């Protein structure tokens, strides 16, 4: 394991050394630190069972991998962001504070039932030219705006956005290190679809790749396994949940079990692309638990978040013994 960590550390060092510097790095770092320290200051009587002492980092959406520095073309990973946005709402409801690391343009908490182009279809000018929500959307828009502002104003929701893999990994590292002082009260819920391969910045061409020279052969480097670093260096005591997405159900559980062991996850949520909104299977070292959306549950994320909160409580209790 020590050798694996050393290799991953070396891979990560060269990834970070060649990554384009993150814009607003200082601001993101101080926002994340302030957000966490508010929760640390709450110091509730019973830290073991009070979700108000806890912070979850929810990652959501897919990363892009640029092929050119002045990027015209990129590789994308599939994720609408629905899972992350819905889960954020349910963690907030349960009393958690949420750091929501999400792909720009992907689904947002409280807005899931709002049409895709809300500015143009949800609002209309009245007789005096003032802009108001349309009758059809008024209730939904008002509830979304209220709930979002309430969560942000109360210091319960921090929204950090990325587009590229470079941005995603740098933000995740900053947030993980900021969350480390929470110890077992921190949770990572890594629903983002993160590319396994990338073009290192220092070997990437500056300008748009030209098509005149025939077929394109390109070698992609493997993305360092950040889960190893997160678990062992950045926030080693946090409760860590990763997701495994497959299209072939035959290999899904086996791959999730491998991820659980390899990255020392506390839980791996296995899901299949077509059925991901109806059913997931949570793999832990105690076996597999099927979590399904039932008739009373509009989202599978309701029982899923509930299950994981209970798992974290058991983990906190076991650590306190
Ligand atoms: C997931 O498996 C998520 O559940 C989905 C959610 C992306 C399927 P939507 O955003 O979908 O609601 O449309 N996320 C992890 C996907 C992933 O790429 N996992 C890697 C893997 O499977 C490990 S990090 O190898």
Image (tube, grey):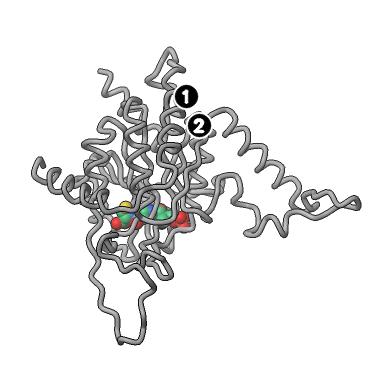
Where does residue 179 sit, x and y in percent of width and height? 36, 31
Q: Where's the C terminus, which quadrant?
A: top left
To which quarter of the image does residue 33 belong?
A: top left
Which of 161/278 is in front? Answer: 161
Label placed on residue 176:
none
Query: Can residue 278 be seen in this snapshot?
Result: no
Viewer-side label of 1, 2: 1
Is 219 located above or below residue 307 in the figure?
below
According to the picture, the residue beneath numbered tag 1 turns out to be 52
Residue 33 can be seen in this image: yes
Helix, strand, or loop for circle 1?
Answer: helix
Check disc 2 and report its element: helix, strand or loop. Answer: loop
Q: Quadrant of ligand 1?
A: bottom left
Which residue is at a point 43% across and 15% down the rendered structure image?
43
Residue pointed to by mark 2: 94
Image coordinates for residue 96, horizontal then vertical, percent: 47, 30
Describe residue 31's horizontal placement relative to residue 248 as left or right. right
Relative horizontal placement of residue 112, taking residue 289 as reference (left or right) = right
Label 2 crowd (10 A; few <14 / some 14-19 / many >=20): some
Q: Nearer the viewer, residue 230 or 239?
A: 230
For this orientation, the residue located farthest to the left is 3
């Amino acid at each position: 394991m020590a050798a694996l960590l050393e290799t991953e550390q070396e891979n990560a060092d060269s990834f970070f050394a060649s990554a384009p510097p993150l814009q607003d790095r200082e601001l993101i770092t101080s926002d994340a630190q302030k957000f966490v320290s508010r929760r640390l200051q709450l110091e509730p009587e019973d830290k073991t069972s009070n979700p108000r002492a806890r912070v979850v980092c929810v990652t959501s959406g897919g990363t892009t991998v640029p092929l050119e520095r002045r990027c015209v073309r990129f590789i994308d990973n599939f994720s609408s962001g629905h899972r992350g946005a819905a889960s954020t709402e349910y963690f907030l409801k349960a009393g958690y504070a949420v750091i929501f690391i999400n792909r720009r343009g992907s689904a947002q908490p409280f807005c899931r039932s709002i049409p895709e182009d809300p500015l143009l279809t949800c609002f209309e000018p009245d007789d005096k030219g003032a802009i108001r929500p349309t009758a059809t959307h008024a209730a939904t828009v008002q509830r979304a705006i209220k709930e979002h502002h309430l969560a942000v104003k109360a210091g319960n929701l921090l929204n950090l956005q990325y587009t590229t893999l470079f941005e995603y990994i740098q933000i995740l590292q900053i947030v993980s290190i900021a969350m480390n002082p929470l110890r077992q009260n921190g949770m990572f819920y890594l629903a983002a679809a993160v590319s396994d391969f990338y073009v290192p910045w220092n070997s990437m061409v500056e300008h748009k790749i030209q098509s005149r020279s025939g077929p394109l052969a390109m070698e992609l480097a493997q993305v360092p396994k950040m889960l190893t670093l997160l678990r062992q260096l950045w926030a080693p005591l946090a409760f860590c949940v990763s997701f495994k997405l497959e299209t072939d159900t035959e290999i899904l559980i086996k791959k999730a079990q491998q991820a659980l062991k390899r990255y020392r996850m506390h839980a791996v949520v296995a899901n299949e692309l077509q059925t991901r909104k109806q059913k997931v299977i949570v793999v832990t070292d105690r076996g597999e638990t099927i979590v399904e959306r039932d008739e009373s549950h509009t989202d599978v994320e309701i029982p899923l978040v509930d299950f994981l909160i209970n798992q974290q409580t058991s983990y906190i209790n076991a650590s306190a013994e």
